[in-house]
Image (spheres, helix red, strand yellow):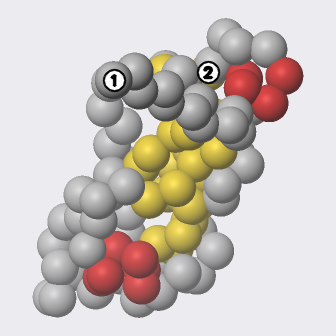
């Protein structure tokens, strides 16, 4: 299971930051071998506005600006990032 290297990441971003600006990069590690140890990043439980304004690179964990940062509309953002491994989900066996 992937584990983030920090409990919380935070960044300060200038209003009207250009598209493509790197906000920060999250990092998680997974001690498993092979594909089970390969980590991919995605948005967790976030609102549509976050998805409109930010992008997350699924391979590197880099979060970048992809929309307009306007503090008159939103003065802060909370972004939930999920780290998953590329392993196959194990099948469940039920005995009756």
How much space separates mark 1 and mark 2, taking CA atoms? 38 Å
**Screen quadrant of the C terminus:** top left
Q: Which residue is mark 1?
A: 96
Q: Nearer the viewer, residue 34 or 63?
A: 34
Q: Where 75 sits versus 41, above or below? A: below
- Secondary structure of the residue carrying tag 2 is strand
Q: Which residue is mark 2?
A: 29
Q: Position of residue 12 (x, y in %)?
A: 34, 54
Q: Report the residue at 56% width, 61% height from top.
A: 56
Q: Residue furthest right?
A: 34
Q: Where 74 sits versus 41, above or below? A: below
Q: Residue furthest front?
A: 96
Q: Is residue 91 left or right of residue 16?
A: right
Q: Where 11 sits versus 51, above or below? A: above
Q: Report the residue at 31% width, 82% height from top.
A: 48
Q: Report the residue at 66% width, 54% height from top.
A: 58
Crowd band around label 2 with a 10 angstrom C-alpha radius: few (<14), some (14–19), many (20+): some
Residue 40 disc label: none
**Residue 27 appears in view:** no
Q: Position of residue 83 (x, y in %)?
A: 52, 39
Q: Quadrant of residue 78?
A: bottom left
Q: Quadrant of residue 14?
A: bottom left
* Marker count (numbered): 2
- Secondary structure of the residue carrying tag 1 is loop
Crowd band around label 1 with a 10 angstrom C-alpha radius: few (<14), some (14–19), many (20+): few
Q: Where 56 sits versus 18, above or below? A: above
Q: Is residue 57 left or right of residue 77?
A: right
> First in sequence: mark 1 or mark 2?
2
């Amino acid at each position: 299971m992937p584990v983030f290297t920090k409990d919380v990441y935070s960044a300060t971003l200038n209003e009207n930051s250009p598209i493509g600006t790197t906000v920060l990069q999250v990092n998680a590690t997974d001690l498993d071998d092979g594909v089970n140890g390969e980590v991919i990043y995605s948005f967790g439980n976030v609102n549509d506005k976050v998805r409109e304004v930010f992008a997350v690179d699924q391979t590197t964990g880099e979060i970048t600006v992809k929309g307009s940062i306007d503090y008159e509309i939103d003065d802060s953002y909370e972004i939930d990032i999920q780290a998953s491994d590329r392993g196959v989900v194990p099948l469940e066996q039920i005995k009756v």
